[in-house]
Amino acid sequence: MASKKLGAYICSGCVIADAVDTEQLAAAASQAGCLARKSPAFCLEDARLIRDDVAQGAVEAVVIAACSPRVNTDVFRIPGATVERVNLREQVAWSHPPNHPETQDLAADYLRMGIERARRVARPEPYVQANTRAVLVVGGGVAGVSAALSAARCGFRVVIVERQSELGGWASHFYRQFPKRFPYQAPQEITVADQARQLGALPNVTIHLSSKVESAEGEPGQFKVVVRTAEGTIEDTVGAIVAATGWQPTATAKCERYGLGVYPNVTTSLEFEGMAKRGELIRPSDRRPARRVLFLLCDGRDDDAHLPYGGNVSSLVALKQALYVRELRPDALAYVFYGDMQTPGQYEYFYRSVQGDPGVLLSQGQVERVAEDREHNLIVEVSDTALGPGATLEIDLIVLAAGMTPSTADGESALGLRYLQGEGLPVTKFGFADSNFVCFPYETRRTGIYSAGAARQAMDMAAAARDGRAAALKAMQSIEKSSAGQAVHPRVGDMSYPAFFMQKCTSCGRCTQECPFGALELNEKRNPVLNPNRCRRCGICMGACPVQIISFADYSVDILSTMITSVEIPEGDADKPRILALACENDAYPALDMAGINRLEYPASIRVIPVRCIGSVNSVLITDAVSRGFDGVALLGCKSGEDYQCHFIQGSELLEKRMANMRETLGRLMLEPERVQVVEVAISDYDKLPSVLAELAETIRQVGPNPMKGF
Amino acid sequence: MAAQAQSPVSADRSAGAAEVSRAILIVGGGIAGITAAVEAAEAGYESIIIEKEPYLGGRVAQLYKYFPKLCPPYCGLEINFRRIKDNPKIRFFTMAQVETVGGAPGNFEVRVLIRPRYVNDRCTACNACVAVCPAERPDAFNFGLGKTKAIYRPHDMAFPMKYAIDDDACSLSECARCVEVCEYGAIDLKMEPRAIVLRAGAIIIATGWKPYDASRIDNLGFGKYADVITNVMMERMAAPNGPTHGRIVRPSDGAPVESAAFVQCAGSRDQNHLGYCSTICCLASLKQAVYLRERNPNAHAHIFYIDLRTPGTYEFFAKKVLSDPFVTVQKGKIAKVALDPQSGRLVVEAEDILSARKTNLKVDLLVLATGMESSLSESRNNGARRPGSESLRRETAPSALQAGPFRVDQDWFAGAEPQDGIFAAGCARGPFDVATSVQDATAAAAMAIEALARAAGS
């Protein structure tokens, strides 16, 4: 690669030339073996100069020293060349004092780093395999049927696996669903049976009933699945999987205080659906008519609640079922006691319409005690209701809201993944599939496997139907992307993937454990084996490897290390400390750009290198930096912990763990641990960055110059 | 894929009318529109976003943080913008609005009007123009709290990072000082509105929401007392790139806020205003109570509510916020708001349903948790010039009716029934939180792709 033809394009626009001497930079680039050009605006007409150089074969690797890589992406996409952007505008000219020797040094270092990176970067060869354009849907409830219909209608072959003997899930056992359309007054018919019929009529759909997925192995594009059916096992290959495995009623042990399981006339909302569907409104104790029915909502704010969190739908279930009471027996009364009525959005109309029913008493209030008399009538003491501070009611039937626990919560997997990291999807503390659930709710930690419906989040039927479609789209997308050898979210389109220099592998297995996406398996020699289509290209494995054998064509320990060592360390000048900042490219790096856009100044002693994820930082880079003479190292990553913001889920958390070892290493080198600092930076923190970085620089200054300088 | 990618979008009306377009046109470039566009494009389809503002991101770009993680919206937007920048299958038009929709599913013809930005693609965002601009405009991005020059960067994280001129505030050719200083020839004061015609196989309406006009609520003092603000204004005040650089202060005199009250259902769940529940306001106020507490550890936040709606796992967020003794709640409605002339503080008279008493509370700041109104609503409410959505309703909907009806209910949200070839997503369908909008938009993208397949098969 030494003979690679490099071109350096140094822009003087947007006050870059007012802040730094671009002639000097161009001369340095020439000296480094680059064809060097200058322009007052490479983003305009002069972009052609770059394209021409590449077209004529004069340049194979382009270094554009101008604005941030976050802007002019389209203009500087140069066909036929690798492109390296050196951020002289936002992170030099706009954030440091003009015509200052430190600013000039900063620009010169960035240019050198860019040139060295350009020299070593290779264009990734995509991993392209013959893919199967088929989607496996696990679970045949509302979400699963909807996902299957959508994928099949879009032209994909669909295999749907349902444990029960018919499609439809819970919905097929229910009487009605919440009103779905304006004016949102009357509960509506459930249509899942009709949807299931439509699915059955499609030619490219296989339905396995009374069946179970026994195992799934492989990667997006080619998962090998084994389905156990009543007739035996069937093997198939699919490109992606939708996990619509639904929900289970929450264990009702804590409902004893309301008489569940103790008194025969206390039941759950699930049982009541069945009763209504059969057209019954009776007391289970004696099958006599139930004329006074009480619906009880235990919301999660109550310490004693039987739900770990408030039900998404339990208020609506109670309202709907109160109307069943009125429909089945017009002379019957329904009572609904609640803490906070949860009828968000247009369901408020439904709430209001139920309020207008004289046979439904809706009131805020609590049930203090439930007892029963000899005839199994329930004697209910309530407080703080519309009936007054304390009241006693005689009730025929109590209906308790059943909580929805995701099927993924019990640890038993319906997917049977043959993954080293486990059979199911990694879940949050609530048992839902782990994801950045606000912005990217479908991105699970198993690429090509998307959860949908109540397994993803407690939701009603209308939402589950839409959710199934959305997950189906993600499944189809993953097949499209893997067919082209491209990554899916968040590094969409990235064609690089990690390569392993196996001769040096010590089989420690750390990469296989730390990959947040379970992309790596172990072979019989306990060596890591990559499934490239599972890989999200974060580089966390690269950060994990203790012998640095993992690299990408365009991102490696070697490339980063060369960039670090290309920084010139002034010797014997205590006023010119040098600090290396490795910054998450998704959040910390844009935040630094924002600081520049707002012309906020931060210490010019800091050299920033963007990294794919802070978890991709191998600790050898830190020791490289300090042995090279850097006075300090800052690791700018995202928030970790329960409310993590890392786009690769675990990057910042893993870094924290690695830091413990790092501090030990520094100790062995007789260096102060304060020289290496981890800073959590959110993208919106740009206003705080200057003071945070100044403080960090000050701390490192107080520790004193790195004694290893010049060695 | 490459051949298919090149074919369908064309401004040429005569180009192969029978051919089914693989393009999906998305009206609205907020979080729902962006999500629909990137999700469809990454599945192999063309996406075209029509956005009326000069930037993408919509309402979420104006939020300081999301509940329940208290994470910044720009974290996810940054990724989504990168997905747009890197994907040639996605095109977008800013300052653009749909005028008419003709044709049929598989082959819609959409006429789009692009308002003049007066700044072309040569803009490098160097900011030299702003220094010389003599005119000012109310900062719409900050809901009128603060001002920008007539030539302005929509906000400091704007995408695309291009400036724009507000022709209500600029005298255009009479001044032209910005033209003189722009080294890149990026300013064109003679720019005219232009119309383009786009073809698409399916359409997604992701026009979003607008804050309900708080001045219509008589008893809460908005527009009468400077220290009565809305929840969206509070987001801007808390944001570091907002009008106060993140300081939460009394707008009347800039004094720090020691106590604030939040009024839930300001306009929502009220048949005189918005009949529905706006879904997000309880969580938003809890979140904003955290903003206040983070800024001022001595400050007190008090929330007046009817029902505290924090469904599902959001309950945990509510519990966490309410475990702070300086965040208190009161079930009850506000009777009236007055100004205490001595202290300059607001006096909030309310009922307390649980104790059946009347209460009086003095606060520095009253935040109205105003609800979400559909942008498709014909009522013009927020002072800012946002003509796009109304024209969509007035002009697009009738012509869309000919093509395959797009229906709006009495509450101005899109009808729940899917219409062939035209689908609604996000807050055009109802008042949703961000996570739900993203889910909903992903589903809408799937429905649009199904419609393309249907049209191709028929």
Image (cartoon, rainbow, N blue to C red):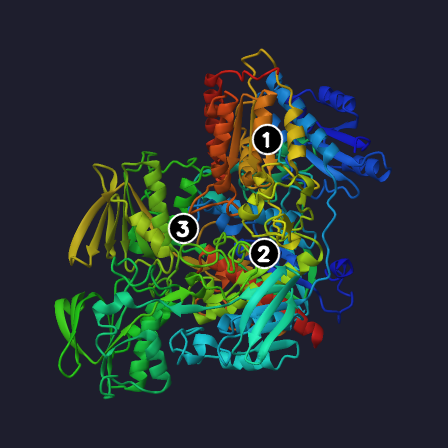
The local crowd at label 1, few if under 14, some if 14 to 19, many if 20 or more residues have their Cα within 10 Å, is many
Residue A431, quarter of the rendered image: bottom left
Asked if residue A86 lies left or right of residue A293, the reply is: right
Query: In front of the other: label 1 or label 3?
Result: 1
The x, y position of residue B23, in whole percent, is 68, 62
Label 2 sits on residue: A447
Quick check: B14 above or below A680?
below
The answer to whether mark 1 and mark 2 are in CB contact below 8 A is no
Among numbered discs 1 and 2, the one appearing first in the sequence: 2
Q: Nearer the viewer, residue B163 or A706?
A: A706
- Residue B395 in sight here: no
The x, y position of residue B381, in whole percent, is 44, 55
Asked if residue B9 lies left or right of residue A183, the reply is: right
What amino acid does circle 1 point to?
Leu
- Label 1: chain? A
- Label 3: chain? B
> What residue is shown at x 32% (from left), y 42% (from top)?
B227
Quick check: B166 above or below A159?
above
Q: Quadrant of the N terminus of chain A?
A: top right
- Residue B76 in sight here: yes
Circle number at residue B68:
3
Q: Nearer the viewer, residue B372 or A537?
A: A537
Asked if residue B205 lies left or right of residue A11, the reply is: left
Label 1 sits on residue: A621
Circle number at residue B343:
none
The answer to whether mark 2 and mark 3 are in CB contact below 8 A is no
What amino acid does circle 3 point to?
Pro
